[in-house]
Amino acid sequence: MSEILVKDKDIVIPGQLLATGMDYLPASGTLRDSDKIVSSIIGIASLNGRLIKIIPLTGPYVPRRDDVVIGKVVDIGFSGWRVDIGWAYQANLSIRDATQEFVEKGSDLTQYYNYGDYIMTRITNVAGSKIIDLGMRGPGLRKLTEGRLIKIIPSKVPRVIGKQGSMITMIKENTNSRILVGQNGFVWISGVNPEDETRAIEAIKMIDQESQTDGLTESIEKFLKGEKK
Amino acid sequence: MTLTKRSDGRKFDELRPMEAKVGVIKRANGSAMFKIGNTQAIAAVYGPRELYPGHLQNPEKGLLRCNYNMIAFSGAGDRVKPGPSRRSREISMVTENALNSIVDLNQYSNAVVDVFIELVNTDAGTRCAGICAAAMALADAGIPMRDMICAVSVGKVEDKIVVDLNYDEDSAEKGVDFPVAITARTGKVTLLQMDGLLKKDEIKDLLRAAKKAAEQINKVQVKAIREKYEK
């Protein structure tokens, strides 16, 4: 006898029983304990047919292949750069993946990316937690200059972007800002003037904190339009 | 001699008043406060982060590292002294073991999840309050967990079985202190220590009492977590 014990969009906590019986399948954020399905994180239950998934409300960023992330150059070696992407270990960006140009042996790598530079980059390979390779090939991957950087909870990134980018487009249009969101929760904002930048940051922080509430898009829209003169 | 009344007027199976809050430390990845009577623990979770010394790194799974500390001003000078001690090393270790069986660190290979438990005010039952706070902080940090966990110290004072001992009872002559950590859903015991002597039947009674008390503590924990996330 299978039974589901949570409703869609319920907030669950670790160890909470989600379903009994073998008719349901555990997806991400859940685990199976004999014939029971249990949540393993704090999040929102999402039921899709027989599949039970938990959308996390908190948690660290774990690097995945093909994620586009924002990172900070923290070290320069013989053959590339070491980049902090908000994970326990630094990622590696080699010369070959960083630029199309021919870089002569022993040349000064700081002319491409210097210490402290922020870059929009793609994870090309993940082999264990200490070997993470980055690449700069792809649209929009570049060094980030003149902007502000904030950090949000990585699991909220899909909400900040919205369906087909609806949320981020709305913020961009209403604040006249360029915004880039990395999957690791780093958000880069560059506006025409500081006031607009600040408003964009406030809107993103609102999404970060209230992502689980209903009518989020409306309240963000109201916020963006309300203060705009 | 028989115990007719507890020093603070509680019933024998009554817990001290509890209070819990999640997200008390802004800069930590996860944090929580748990207060039971005059014992107050604050736990902060950092990580997964880079693990040093390097020989502790495990490519198969992450490491959980706990640090238990009674802050120098948290209690009377005969018991609480500043700095690490044999006692705090031991309690850090048993806390680590109690929590290790519920956290799932398989996806954090080579990394470490640090749990710092600081006791702000102490009146017995500190390792239990620490575990209660640490469990909430780990959940708040988004570390995958198989279950929630809470801990309570039960014991024997004179001939009576009592729940949640205070310092007077804990230090009473021939008093037995019996801290137990119990998982919320499965009811498994992950910490069990005994300071004193007990008969076999008494141990069974104590475990039963601990299980009952744990249910109440778990409710407080769940409520605190929900308070932060259900807005």
Image (tube, coloured by chain):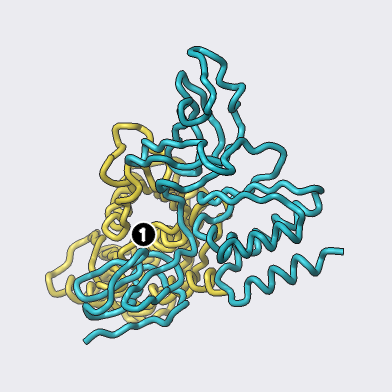
Residue nearest the viewer, comparing A63 with A121: A121
Q: Give the image location of residue B228, x and y in percent.
A: 54, 69
The residue that label 1 is drawn on is: B144
Which image quarter holds the C terminus of chain A? bottom right
Q: Is residue A222 above or below residue A74?
A: below
Between A109 and B22, which is closer to the camera in this rendering?
A109
Subunit ID for the residue under disc 1: B
Mark 1 surroundings within 10 Å by alpha-carbon count, few (fewer than 14), some (14 through 19), many (20 or more):
many
Q: Is residue A122 above or below residue B148?
A: above
Q: Residue at x 35, y 69 (%)?
A: A39
Quarter of the image where the N terminus of chain A is located: bottom left
Q: Is residue B87 visible?
A: no
Chain letter of the cyan region:
A
Shown colour of chain B: yellow
Image height check: is A118 above or below A44?
Answer: above
- Identify which amino acid the numbered label 1 is placed on: Pro
Instruction: Compare residues A40 and B200 and report the one nearer the observer.
Output: A40
Tell which residue pokes out farthest to the bottom in this image.
Answer: A1
Question: Looking at the picture, how far across and down is residue B61, in whole percent?
Answer: 28, 46
Q: Residue B114: x, y in percent? A: 41, 47
- The residue tagged with tag 1: helix, strand or loop? loop
Is B102 left or right of B35, judged from the image as shown? left
- Residue drawn 38% across the image and 73% down it: B218
The answer to which image quadrant residue B200 occupies is bottom left
